[in-house]
Amino acid sequence: MTAAVTAITMPKWGLTMTEGTVVGWLKQQGQCFAEGEEILEIETPKITNVVEAPSGGTLRRIVAQAGATLPIGALLAVVAPDEVPEAEIDAFVAGFAVAEPSTSEEAQAEGVKPRDIEVGGRRLRYLELGEGDGAPVLLVHGFGADLNTWMFTQPALAARRRTVALDLPGHGGSAKEVGAGDVDSLTDAVEGALGALGVEQVHFVGHSMGGAVAASLALRRPERAASLTMIASAGLGPEINTSFIDGFVRMARRREAAEVIGLLVHDPALVSRAMVEDVLRYKRLDGVSAALAKVAEAWFSGGRQSLDLTSRIAELAMPVQVIWGREDRIVPVAHAEALANRLPVHILDAAGHLPHMEKAGEVNRLIEQFISR
Amino acid sequence: MPQKSIRQALNEALAQEMRRDPTVVVIGEDVAGGAATEGQRDAYGGVLGVTKGLFAEFGEARVIDTPITESAIMGAAAGAAVTGLRPVAELMFSDFFGVCFDQIFNQAAKFRYMFGGKAKTPLVIRTMIGAGRSAAAQHSQSPYHIFTSVPGLKCVVPSNAYDAKGLLIQAIRDDDPVIFCEHKLMYDLRTEVPDEPYSIPFGEANIVRDGDDVTVVALSRMVHYAGEAADTLAKEGIECELIDPRTTSPLDEDTILESVERTGRIVVVDEATPRCSIATDIAALVADKAFAALKAPVRRVTAPHTPVPFAPVLEKLYIPSPERIAAAVREVRGYVG
């Protein structure tokens, strides 16, 4: 019977998470749920996210109450069929052992450490997770972001395949030289990274500017693209919120940064001070503001997107899908709506420009279903 | 990201800025490190170990050992700054500022103003503060409030290695004289520090932890004591918002005032003596600009108005403790007007 008793534990989202706080339970003790239903909310130092049920069952025991802050791997709740006796649940809780923190932390740190590759004489940082036989997933972040934007996406997709998240030139842990900073130079960098990693064909998943980079690489080298998922992508229309772009390039202080970063999400309360601090730590590095200014000038000068790929979407022979947040305040959702009669388009309610963070479970499911067809 | 001590972070900041800008020079007592040792001029990396390796890399024209004469160090550095270099001068113990205060207070601090904005004085003075090593009354003080009170000087008081590196780089790039105060008990304190150069703007406080009950403002080593107190208080259900101003001049008044507007209660922790101090200055700021928000009197936790005692037991009593900080927070939290 014990095999049917499973634990819900504190997840690890992102490279730096060591503990999380239970915000609240969305299911009551004793309640049944199906796979994918939202079980509880966890607040990390960066952002709040929902834990979804990995499989159906009954929430037999809530161990961690709202407000509790616990290390990753700690027991939060016990799931088991109704017929499992209470005594067995008690025994499960009593016997639950969090993986030895010292060894597991070391092992995890070893396993999830980003690495560097040389592309065109320039250092690029990437994070690889998961393994499998099929085409790997390549995740390309947007303007001003880095591979941590995939903190909820990459671990989920990595359960069944190799995944690689890349820091674009000028971003995250990559070198700060961006070359021309335009779509061609960023596409060159991603193509070079694929070569350096020895990957033939990938499922591209790109967000915002990274969506346009992925699309342009799929246009340039169609044989390399098993599929393309464009999330709140640039390059699909002229409109762009330049007060975000300009603000992001300019901001140096916490107050201004919080306002600018708040534009990314439908509910600014989701953005924690730690998330703002992380962005500021990146912005303070020598060369970052100059690199971002160059990229912004190449992509978004004059208050408009200079790249429009809409007329070339039909050339993409691989499966292409588009995912957008209905409340996007950076790139208007109309860009997705205009493609709805040509491509699978998924518009998510209560999500802004970061649907892969704000509605992580839904976006993960959409990508998983799309690439495992 | 690599963990580095404050000592390493400062060393890295100096080396990176000296590589970037040939006008950056280091000057002070034994900054070359072990000049008197046989055969090896960089034996110790200076008395504090902060300048280790600089002499070997940059040579004696840019790493300048001086006699034990603070007035000459500061005079030379101020003059060099106003004539085109970016000197980082070391005043080993801040307690010694008295012998070179004309050069700092009446010369470097005034040049920009006296010369109608035509002169700039990109001078950094690194100096040690703090009690806790039984170094007695003449080597244990924290006189950053005196530098803070001088218009024309900027004053930096970092509490961790990340801030120390970013603020020292900012100080070197700043065109005004900056007093950079390093706590002598914190050089080995480690935190994550990027390898790349970066700068943290002055006048931007760090919110060390969020809380809605009581605002706690603390500087330098006291940030860590206040953090310990906040951990204890959190178990009692009292959530402190801990603010580290990072620089006392300029001071990020907005972050302090906005926090007090929300919490209505404030405790200011300061290792320095209380008269005309940073703690007193911030208390006055809050009384002046956030009086209507206050639900309890402003409390200061400071050293007493006495010299720092030599006897270890007395010195321990002298320095604000986590227990005293926690008691002050409980008092303002429980205050009924």
Image (tube, coloured by chain):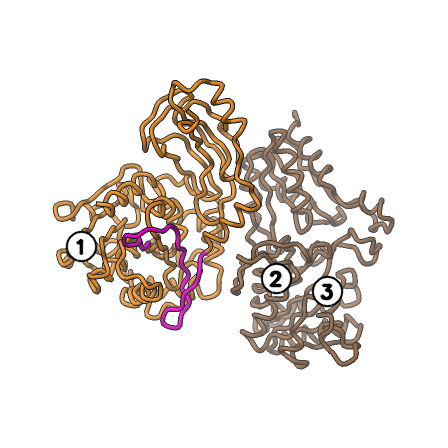
Chain colours: A orange, B brown
| Marks 2 & 1, CB-CB < 8 Å contact | no
Camera sees residue A304:
no
What residue is at 59 percent from the left and 61 percent from the top? B165
Q: Which residues are magenta?
A: A114-139
Residue B251, how many percent across, how many down? 60, 52
On what subunit does the disc labeled 2 rest?
A: B
Per the picture, the main secondary structure of the magenta-coloured stretch is strand
Gap between marks 1 and 3 measured at Cα:
62 Å
Residue at mark 1: A318
Q: Quadrant of the N terminus of chain A?
A: top left
Residue at mark 2: B9
Q: Is residue A303 above or below residue B337?
A: below
User: Do the residues indicated by labels 1 and 3 lie within the same chain of the protein?
Assistant: no
Helix, strand or loop under label 3: loop
Amino acid type at circle 3 is Leu
Q: Is residue B251 left or right of residue A23?
A: right
Residue B147, how many percent across, how many down? 69, 59
| Marks 1 & 3, CB-CB < 8 Å contact | no
Q: Which one is closest to the eye, mark 1 or mark 3? A: 1
Foreground of the two, A132 or A272: A132
